[in-house]
Image (tube, rainbow, N blue to C red):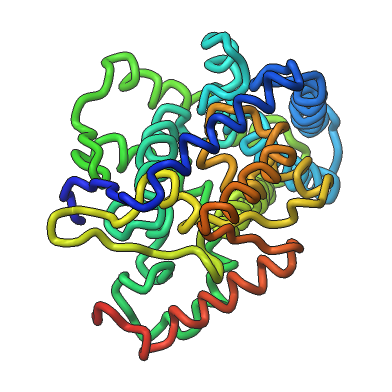
Amino acid sequence: MSVAKIHFVDPVHHDFHRVLKKRVDSYFKEKNVSIKANGFMIFKTVFYLGTLIASYLTLVFGGFGAAINLSLFAIIGLFTAFIGVNICHDAIHGAYSHNKWINKTFSLFFNLAGASDYMWSIMHNIVHHTYTNIQGHDEDIELVPILRMSPHQEYKKIMRYQHIYAFILYGFTTISWVFIKDYKKFFQAQIGNYDNKHHPKKEYFYLFFYKIIYYILFIAIPLSVLNMAWWQTLIGFFILHFIEGFTLAIIFVLAHVVDGPEFPLPDENGVIASNWAIHQLRTTADFCRKSWLVSFICGGLNFQIEHHLFPKICHVHYPDLSEIVKSTAEEFDVPYHEQETFFGAVKSHIRLLKKLGRPDLVVVKA
């Protein structure tokens, strides 16, 4: 993996970010509202956490048979994903509240997805948000060796079918977090440009502590108390994670691995010919900006452009901010990528996977 330092340089659009920030600041002053969570966000928090807790307690204490229990595993998986994108994602970014302890408390629920909130803050907040779609630096476009999500990745013959099998692999996303990825990345010396060798001592403890708690809650206790065979319980655990992983993966890939967003490479001096803010617009896409339901489900991550530009602003404000960002982008002749519908975004993702699976788009051969 490349570890060359990346620098963003763009003398043309140097005023864009300043003007945009000023307009966004003016929006909140004129509305006289906080950039953090509001009443609607609190409702979402209660709704998603309440549904997850109720589903888990019903699973453990309900005494139901295999059919109902497997359905409850599926619901738990779905709502775990919803909590991840609606609550924990904001909290880990510091966007939920001005109070760091409130943010930290809600961040810890991310461990209910089987993932480490600490490692997510490194791989997502620092690495992905800084080096979006840059090969060798953004690991979100390097999910597994047989998926090619950038034209600069190694090509393998099997990838001609990736637009078919990718959606199956997405379902294994959180299973990987639970058993492999967090441990591997925690002890990996370098993640892109990020020096990953020095963790606070307490994080060594928390990595294993929260994993053990998760294994007890979602493996040991169900195996001990559910009225079903052990192998049926493990199938339920797999169903939980397949739904959870697929939901999380599809929300994130529709923001970066679709038609429109670019995959820039730095020059020999590590320079990206764009300032950081412009880079975010060139490498990111929105979808379903007009859909209240999609925004409610996706935690505002259908507004990925706005999120990448203003990660410390709570996602409930993104629909209004998107109009400001889009108009400012048009004024400065900066691209603003978006898909009007969810299925349109999915089709765009499939088209790009097909293109990247063709040998004539090979940049690096196996």
In this picture, residue 74 sits left or right of residue 325: right
User: 206 and 261: which one is in front?
Assistant: 261
Above-or-below relation of 277 to 153: above
Residue 289 visible, this orientation: yes
Residue that lies at the very extreme toward the bottom in this rendered image: 360
Residue 354 location (% of width, % of height): 52, 81
Above-or-below relation of 203 to 299: above
Residue depicted at x 17% and y 49%: 3
Above-or-below relation of 151 to 158: above
Residue 231 visible, this orientation: no
User: 308 and 228: which one is in front?
Assistant: 308
- Tell me where residue 31 sits by quadrant: top right
In this picture, residue 145 sits left or right of residue 270: right
In this picture, residue 336 sits left or right of residue 210: right
Residue depicted at x 57% and y 33%: 89
Residue 147 location (% of width, % of height): 43, 69
Residue 218 location (% of width, % of height): 61, 34
Query: Which quadrant of the rendered structure holds the C terminus?
Result: bottom left
Residue that lies at the very extreme toward the left in this rendered image: 269
In this picture, residue 281 sits left or right of residue 317: left
Above-or-below relation of 154 to 283: below
Residue depicted at x 64% and y 60%: 338
